[in-house]
Amino acid sequence: MIEPDFLRETRTSYDAVATAFAAQFRDELTSKPWDRAVLTAFAELVQRTGGGPVADVGCGTGAVTGYLSGLGLAAFGIDLSPGMLAVARRDHPDLRFDEGSMTALDLPENGLAGITAWYSIIHVPDELLPETFAGFHRALAPGGHLAMVFQVGDEPVIRTEGFGQPLSLTFRRRRPEQVAALLTDAGFTLRAQLVREPEPYDGGTEKTPQAYLLARKPGP
């Protein structure tokens, strides 16, 4: 099977900047109270429904995976980039990190208590979101929870350079109602939706509003 260009380009780009990316954004969550609040709410929801394994898909260097583990979840990371995973394993040696794509999760059916997609659906083309969300739904156990965040907007942003390295990355900004409708079509029940305005953080300043969605696979 031929690998889509966007997967190869995304992997190559993040491999090239993994070490520099980690150095700049390792402590990013400390300056993002909204992110921490949503992740904490997600963790409590997972624990209230019995707990179990939680996949942080598109985990990058593992910051969110580590934060979820610190909240008491059995979290592990999945990412496309071996370079990012090498940093994640270095920084979080007690946690599990697997190479893989969110567009084709190689996970047992009904095996997860939760999934997070933290700024990771941003690289998935629109036409692949339905099957990506169907894969999330398949991997979650009945009653399992999903949390995601992404930039709000209508036009993609293309980056050809970053950290002094050539890149080929497309950042797809989306409307929360568009993503919520796709989640519903995939079988999820929307639990919460939050849009906040851009804020400064350690390492930069956001340029767009940010959307958080919490959804649940129907079940007990």
Image (tube, rainbow, N blue to C red):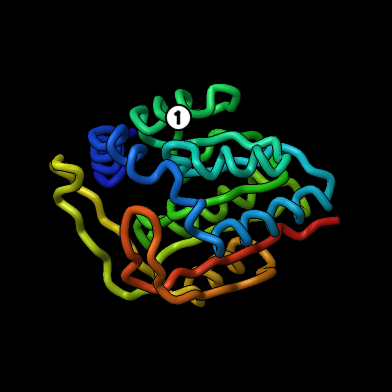
Q: Residue 125 falls in which quadrant of the image?
A: bottom left
Q: Residue 110, can we see it?
A: no
Q: Residue 36 falls in which quadrant of the image?
A: bottom right
Q: Residue at x 69, y 35 (%)?
A: 74
State which quarter of the image contains the N terminus.
top left
Relative to residue 107, is residue 50 depicted above or below?
below
Q: Residue 28, can we see it?
A: yes
Dot 1, crowdedness within 10 Å: few (<14), some or many (≥20)? some
Residue 79 at x, y percent in the picture: 44, 37
Q: Which residue is mark 1?
A: 99
Q: Residue at x 61, y 48 (%)?
A: 115
State which quarter of the image contains the C terminus.
bottom right
Residue 185 at x, y percent in the picture: 58, 67
Q: Amino acid at mark 1?
A: Glu
Q: Residue 154 falls in which quadrant of the image?
A: bottom left
Residue 199 at x, y percent in the picture: 41, 69
Relative to residue 108, is residue 140 depicted above or below?
below
SS for callout 1 = strand
Please name whichever residue, 120 or 201, is drawn nearer the observer in this view of the structure.
Answer: 201
Q: Residue at x 37, y 62 (%)?
A: 126
Looking at the image, residue 128 sits to the left or right of residue 11; the answer is right
Q: Residue at x 60, y 41 (%)?
A: 55
